[in-house]
Amino acid sequence: MDQIIFINPPMHVKKNDTYTTGIVFMPFVLAEAVGIANFFKIENRVLDCFGENPKKTNLNSELNDIIIGISEKEIVRNLKKFSKNKNTLFVIFANHMSNHWSVKNLCKICKSFDGKNQIMLLENSEAVTSYSIRSVLHEFQNLGVTYFCDYDVEENFVKFIKNNFNIKEIFKMKFKYKGDVLEDSSNTKSYVPSWEAFPLKNYWGLNFGHGPVSSSKYLPLLTSKGCPYPCQFCVMPELSQRRWRYRSPKDIFLEIEYWYNKLGVSEFHVEDTNPTINVQRLQKLSKLIYLSKLKNKISWKIVSGTKLETIKTQEILKDMKQGGLSYVSFSPESGSKKIRNLIGKPFDIEHSVNFVSWASKLNVKTQACFIIGFPDENLVDLLKSFLLISRLTFFGVDEIAIFIISPVPGSELYKNERVSGYTNNNEFSFSPNWRKDYKFLQFIKLICYANFLFLKLIFWPKRFFKNFFTIFGIKKFSIDLKMESAPIRSRYYKKNIQRVHNEV
């Protein structure tokens, strides 16, 4: 093979739910794979089908979706131009289950080209919105897929490159195994994701991402990989094999410093599924930032959730705040101990209440995430979640997020077929309108959100009105919460949908 073409799919958005779907994730695992190719000096190109034109909206005739990004004709034209007269490995990023239709369509496109080209599926092993390629591999049998890379890009993609390309340099792993937990190793050669290959200005121009975007330039950041917990609704136990590997504070700091100096990036969204399992790392990182020239210049946010119990004291949180921490997302999942036990989710409610109170005093924004619709859940369990939301709101949680359970391919729910009615992987999202109880669960969501907003207005009126003014642009504030950016993003999509309908 002469070169690699890395492809990020366009993004799918459900027309009937532009709040829960259409969340913008920058492709950090794909950027890492590009970084590996550059490290080995392998010729490569990147086609970010979403990022190339995130303002273009296309209608999907097969699904009740809109597709954001360049059109299929533009994809074909670019790939033909990039791969002309060269034997190419197409690496297609299977980034999120909601984009599964487009991942398969990209395989069809790449298969149609002449030449000795090959196709690899690259699994997104570091996101709860991802899915297991192994679980749906049968759907790719006749689509020309030759390879798939799962679990850990650093390990498996590097092995593939060594076996299939003429490599002279020896790559040293950033992480080393030590028993069942991976320990950081010192004196190893490291690299950074190749974000220069992506259309960053287009992402920044949207002013919304997975986390709340408060600065003109932001980047995702992985400080660790994997998750050791067995939550049944989540795909991470399958993707990470319940192993957790982490980077040293110095290594993380050097990456932050690198992007600040090179691109002027001042905001970093920590996308780890559980960055605080070893919270001392982030304490040390915070001190490195606080004692450096980056003090008061850097903001970092834990946007994908974390384990709160390891942040045991207010002093630990204060250290992290001094080093730039401004936002923390965490996931009680349910107010019912019965449901948490069925899920396999250990969670200390009393500590979460204390944490929210500490964060409120330190002006660290917090988000609490819940799931509803788990099998065996009843009205009493839903009431307990309602009451926990109320309690957290009283003590100062800044926002909540509620998701309806969907059986993600690779999760235990998917394997055991414990959610009925799910027949088509193309229809997956966290807005599963194929569920028979979907309307009821949507009603429960609305009640919980209305209760949260009412209590926030009563107990935290200044914060409530700040959120209100930000959402509707009445007064210019920075976006500090996902609940502030979600309505803005939803209006943006609806405007584009209407424009496309008018053109048709």
Image (spheres, rainbow, N blue to C red):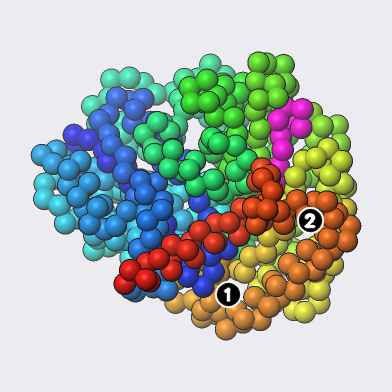
Between 259 and 309, the one lying in front of the other is 259
Does residue 77 appear left or right of residue 235 in this picture? left
Callout 2: few (<14), some (14-19), or many (20+) C-alpha neighbours within 10 Å?
Answer: some
Q: Amino acid at mark 2?
A: Phe
Does residue 334 appear left or right of residue 421 in this picture? right
Q: Is residue 372 magenta?
A: no
Does residue 435 appear left or right of residue 154 in this picture? right
Q: Position of residue 391 (x, y in %)?
A: 87, 60
- Which is more N-terminal, label 1 or label 2? 1
* The residue stretch that appears in magenta: 320-329
| The disc label shown at residue 464, or none | 2
Q: Position of residue 347 (x, y in %)?
A: 78, 54
Residue 456, compared with residue 302, is above or below; it is below
> In the rendered view of the protein, which quadrant contains the N terminus?
top left
Q: From the image, tell me which residue sits under label 1.
A: 418
The secondary element bearing badge 2 is classed as: helix
Tell me, yes or no, if residue 283 can be seen here. no
Does residue 133 appear left or right of residue 241 in this picture? left
Q: Position of residue 417 (x, y in %)?
A: 53, 74
Q: CA distance from mark 2 to mark 1?
A: 39 Å
What's the residue at 27%, 41% (across, down)? 5
Q: Position of residue 434 (x, y in %)?
A: 51, 79
